[in-house]
Image (tube, helix red, strand yellow):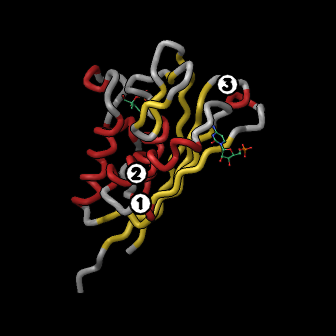
Amino acid sequence: MMRIGHGYDVHAFDQSRPLIIGGLEIPHDRGLKGHSDADVLLHTITDAILGALALGDIGKFFPDTDAKYKDADSKLLLSEVVDMMHSKGYEIGNIDAVVLAERPKFRPYIDQMRESVASLLKTDLANVNIKATTSEKLGFIGREEGIASEAVVLLNKQEVN
Ligand SMILES: Nc1ccn([C@@H]2O[C@H](COP(=O)(O)O)[C@@H](O)[C@H]2O)c(=O)n1
Ligand SMILES: C[C@@]1(CO)OP(=O)(O)OP(=O)(O)OC[C@H]1O
């Protein structure tokens, strides 16, 4: 059995924070605002998995009103959702994600991001694709007000005969 999920998230820039994307700290002059560490890519992937399982979204499990998640490491939130996925008998088929940002250039870090995400998802590197794109200076991405991310995920469940 296969199930598909989609995730989308946006975080505004915050000059006082480090930029954390895909579980990595990326050198840049600003980070992202959020209740947690604001890892927009990991939030998107977390939401895509929850979506595939029809379980709702990240804020349902990790509310931004709960002090427990203040400055939370998004790797831990994703890992918890991956554990939920495994407990329901599913594993990652493949994932395809895109990060939308005018700056910085992510290409030099994409392979490391893929490794980080594959390890969090407990899947092979070949099952994880991460892309980056600008918005050609248009809209809130283009004005460098924030970063968005989008992902689709396919989950597989082995049927027992
Ligand atoms: N933040 C970004 C944005 C883009 N890239 C890479 O540049 C390529 C061209 O970007 P366009 O927005 O002009 O399509 C894109 O395919 C990425 O490889 C990037 O690394 N970081
Ligand atoms: C991760 C959580 C929880 O700390 O907070 P944020 O970092 O603000 O992220 P968002 O994607 O807005 O929503 C999920 C939240 O509940």
- Compute the Cα span from label 3 to label 2: 27 Å
x, y percent for residue 131: 59, 50
Q: Say if 27 sits above or below 7 in the image.
A: above
Q: Residue at x 44, y 63 (%)?
A: 127
Asked whether the residues under the numbered discs 1 and 2 touch, taking CB atoms below 8 Å apart as contact, a structural biologist would say: yes
Report crowding for label 2: few under 14, some 14 to 19, many 20 or more residues within 10 A (C-alpha): some
- Badge 1 is on which residue? 125
- Badge 2 is on which residue? 115
Look at label 1 and name its amino acid. Answer: Leu
Report crowding for label 3: few under 14, some 14 to 19, many 20 or more residues within 10 A (C-alpha): some
Q: Residue at x 77, y 32 (%)?
A: 138
- Compute the Cα span from label 1 to label 3: 30 Å
Asked whether the residues under the numbered discs 1 and 3 touch, taking CB atoms below 8 Å apart as contact, a structural biologist would say: no
Question: Going by the picture, which residue comes out furthest to the bottom?
Answer: 161
- Compute the Cα span from label 1 to label 2: 6 Å
At mark 2, the secondary structure is helix
Label placed on residue 144: 3
Look at label 2 and name its amino acid. Answer: Glu
x, y percent for residue 110: 52, 46
Closer to us: 151 or 101? 101
Look at label 3 and name its amino acid. Answer: Glu
At mark 3, the secondary structure is loop
Q: Residue at x 33, y 44 (%)?
A: 78
Quarter of the rendering occupied by the C terminus = bottom left
Q: Is mark 3 within 8 Å of ligand 1?
A: no
**For marks 1 and 3 on the same chain, the one whose residue lies earlier in the sequence:** 1
